[in-house]
Amino acid sequence: MGKPVSLNRYRKEKVRAEKKARADENAVKFGRSKPEKMIVKLQQDKTRRDLDNHELDE
């Protein structure tokens, strides 16, 4: 007869695989690539600089 097998291990592996698959789907659906994030950051920095340069001095 074979060795006893822990079914909990297989259940946990299955749950982990399902969570990873869902995380990958969400990353594709909602995630942004590094260049996209950098473009947005640069645009925000430029907007902030432009607004700071247009402040009125007292």
Image: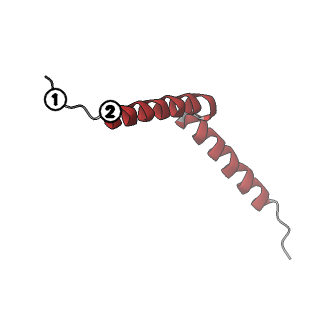
What residue appears at the point 78 percent right and 57 percent down from the top-left corner?
51
Of the pair 21 and 57, the residue shown nearer to us: 21
Which residue corresponds to mark 2? 7
Which residue corresponds to mark 1? 3
State left or right for residue 20 relative to residue 56: left
Of the pair 40 and 56, the residue shown nearer to us: 40
Q: Quadrant of the C terminus?
A: bottom right
Q: Secondary structure at mark 1?
A: loop
The x, y position of residue 24, in whole percent, is: 51, 30
Task: Tell me how far mark 2 sits from mark 1, CA to CA.
Answer: 12 Å
- Amino acid type of the residue tagged 2 in the rendering: Leu
State left or right for residue 13 relative to residue 42: left
* Residue sitting at the far left: 1
What residue appears at the point 76 percent right and 61 percent down from the top-left corner?
52
- Amino acid type of the residue tagged 1 in the rendering: Lys
Q: Secondary structure at mark 2?
A: helix
The x, y position of residue 28, in whole percent, is: 57, 28
Of the pair 36 and 5, the residue shown nearer to us: 5
What residue appears at the point 34 percent right and 37 percent down from the top-left corner?
8
Quadrant of residue 15 in the image? top left
Mark 2 residue crowding within 10 angstroms, few (<14) / some (14–19) / many (20+): few
Q: Quadrant of the N terminus?
A: top left
State left or right for residue 57 relative to residue 48: right
Mark 1 residue crowding within 10 angstroms, few (<14) / some (14–19) / many (20+): few
